[in-house]
Structures are given as C-alpha cells and as structure tokens.
Amino acid sequence: QCGAILSRLSFNEKNREKMANDVFIDALFKLAESEPPHTEHTNDSLMTQQRIVNAIYNVSSHPPSRPLFLARGAAKFLTNFQTRPLEAIRKGCAASLCNLLVDEGTELDVLAVGGVSALLITALVASDKFETKKICTKCLYNLLSEPACHDKMVQEGVLWGFAALCKGPDGGVV
C-alpha cells in the first residue's frame, strides 16, 4: 500500500516539491528492492513496482529533484528496473531517464551505468509499444547532446539501433 500512496501523492505538483528529498527517494528505492526477485513476480508486485516507477517519474519532473535522484543512483536503478516484464514499468523507467537527461551534465551518469544498451534493448526487443520506443529514442538523442558520449554510444550500437528504429514493420522507413 505504501507504493500506491506515494504514487498517488506524487501526481500533485505541490507534493512533488515536498517529495524532492533524500528520505523520499531512498524510500522509493527501498520499496522497489523489497519486491520479489525477477523470477517471482506476481500481479501485486508488478503493480507496486509500476506505482514506484510512476512516483519516480512524477517527482523527477520537478527540476530540483533531478540532482538528488542522480546522486542516489537513479540512473543505475532505472536502467536495471526497466527489464521488468510489465510494459508500463519499462515505459516509466525510460520516461524517468528522459526527465533526468533534461539537465545538461547528466549524460555521462546515464552512459556510465549502461543506459545506452538498456534503452536500445527496451526499444528494439523488450517493448512492442511505439510510445515506449519513442521515449527510448528521445533519451538516446538527449545523450548525443554530450560529445563525450559519442564514441561509447557508437561502440554500444547506437548507429545500428537508430537504423533499426527507423525501419517500419513492413521494411519501409518510419
């Protein structure tokens, strides 16, 4: 129930301002870690995880919270958490990463924890939803704003990934 309450409260802008602190962010991560391991997901645990990701997304839309999230390891958490089997979780993790990448200087943090590979896998393999693919592509594009990321991104397959994302289901260009 804690995940549901925190998620619900995070939809209010005034609450997001108050939630932008280390105690709240740590509580979200601890709630997420308290869920069953990857192989033991139940509908209840997936719903709790989705609510946690909703709260992270909502609070990370509040600019002062972004440095706090990054300092608490959110880039690594979101990169790992987006492997969950529920599409809403993958979409929420990608959208939260996108929020974190709005601010200049955050690109290397996301790159360092395997963000490129995770976003490519989500966009090209794990997700079949256009909106999630679009969010992942936007994240990758945001990473390109930092020239220091370019070489590593190319090594991790971003050129192939962008080419594959541009290819439509019928083989034509999207």
Image (tube, rainbow, N blue to C red):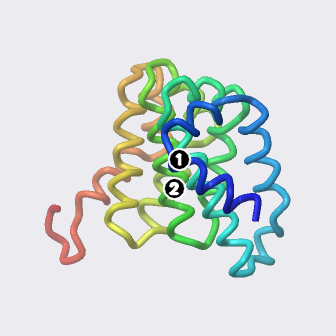
Q: Residue at x 40, y 41 (%)?
A: 140
Mark on residue 57? 1
Q: Position of residue 59 (x, y in %)?
A: 56, 40
Q: How many marks?
A: 2
Q: Label 2, secondary structure: give it.
A: helix
Alpha carbons under labels 1 and 2: distance apart: 6 Å
**Quick one: 73 or 68, which is closer to the camera?**
68
The correct choice, above or below, for 58 with respect to 123 in the image is above
Mark on residue 92? 2
Q: Position of residue 1 (x, y in %)?
A: 76, 65
How packed is label 1: few (under 14 Cα within 10 Å), some, or many (20 or more)?
A: many
Q: Residue at x 51, y 34 (%)?
A: 100
Q: Residue at x 15, y 62 (%)?
A: 173
Instruction: Verify CB contact (< 8 Å) between mark 1 and mark 2.
Output: yes
Mark on residue 49? none
Residue 116 appears in view: no
Q: Is residue 23 left or right of residue 130?
A: right
Type of amino acid under label 1 = Tyr
Q: Position of residue 144 (x, y in %)?
A: 37, 30
Q: Position of residue 5 (x, y in %)?
A: 68, 58
Rendering quarter of residue 147: top left
Q: Label 1, secondary structure: give it.
A: helix
Q: Residue at x 14, y 68 (%)?
A: 172
Quarter of the picture containing the C terminus is bottom left
